[in-house]
Amino acid sequence: MVIVDEKDAPFRIPDPPETRVLKCLLSPELHPEVTNIGVGITIMPAASQSDYIGHDEGEMFYVVSGCGKFRVENGLYDMKPGVMIWVGPHEKHQMINDSDTTMKILWVLTPPGKEGEILKAAAGR
């Protein structure tokens, strides 16, 4: 069993214009007993966005609070509390907080891997 308090999670804050807080909650790099999943939280301030990127892992996003848009190659979709979005490996995607409030998103990577960037940046602080 693994229990993690979000306030204790390692984090990374990318440079503008993709400024947001990326927290890693669960990773094989942190928890050797976890082998097939990476989990974290993204906290996006008002009027912010993530980079538009695809990666080797599939990724699920679940909107905890706030609202905005989710961009993929074939369109732009609404993000609001309770909405879940899945993107497959290498599918380019971007989160856009076009509101005046903070947006909080839970994400899950499978297989894990990309969350290692957050851990490396957190270790370097």
Image (cartoon, rainbow, N blue to C red):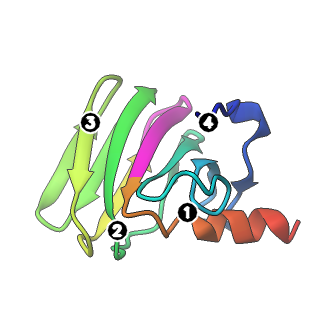
Q: Are marks 3 and 2 in contact (CB under 8 Å)?
A: no
Earlier in the chain: of badge 1 and badge 3, it is: 3
**Could you give the CA–CA distance between mark 1 and mark 4, rounded to whole angstroms?**
17 Å
Using the rendered image of the protein, determine whether residue 114 is visible from the camera's viewpoint. Answer: yes
Instruction: Bin the neighbour count of mark 3 within 10 Å (Cα to Cα): few under 14, some 14-19, many 20 and up.
Output: some
Earlier in the chain: of badge 1 and badge 2, it is: 2
Quarter of the image where one finds residue 32 = bottom right
Q: Nearer the viewer, mark 1 or mark 4?
A: 4
> What residue sits 62% from the left and 36% below the top?
2
Tell me the magenta residue range.
Answer: 97-108
Q: From the top left corner, tell me how far across and down residue 99 is, in percent.
A: 45, 34
**Could you give the CA–CA distance between mark 1 and mark 2, rounded to whole angstroms?**
10 Å
Q: Nearer the viewer, mark 4 or mark 2?
A: 4
Q: Are marks 4 and 2 in contact (CB under 8 Å)?
A: no
Using the rendered image of the protein, determine whether residue 97 is visible from the camera's viewpoint. Answer: no
The three-letter amino acid code for the residue at tag 2 is Glu
Residue that numbered label 1 is attached to: 115
**On residue 2, which mark appears?**
4
**Could you give the CA–CA distance between mark 4 and mark 2, rounded to whole angstroms?**
22 Å
Q: Is residue 88 left or right of residue 22?
A: left
Q: Secondary structure at mark 3?
A: strand
The three-letter amino acid code for the residue at tag 1 is Glu
Residue that numbered label 3 is attached to: 84
Q: Secondary structure at mark 2?
A: loop
Q: Secondary structure at mark 1?
A: loop
Residue that numbered label 2 is attached to: 57
Q: Nearer the viewer, mark 1 or mark 3?
A: 1
**On residue 93, which mark appears?**
none
Q: Nearer the viewer, mark 3 or mark 4?
A: 4
**Could you give the CA–CA distance between mark 1 and mark 3, rounded to whole angstroms?**
19 Å
> What residue sits 78% from the left and 62% below the top?
122
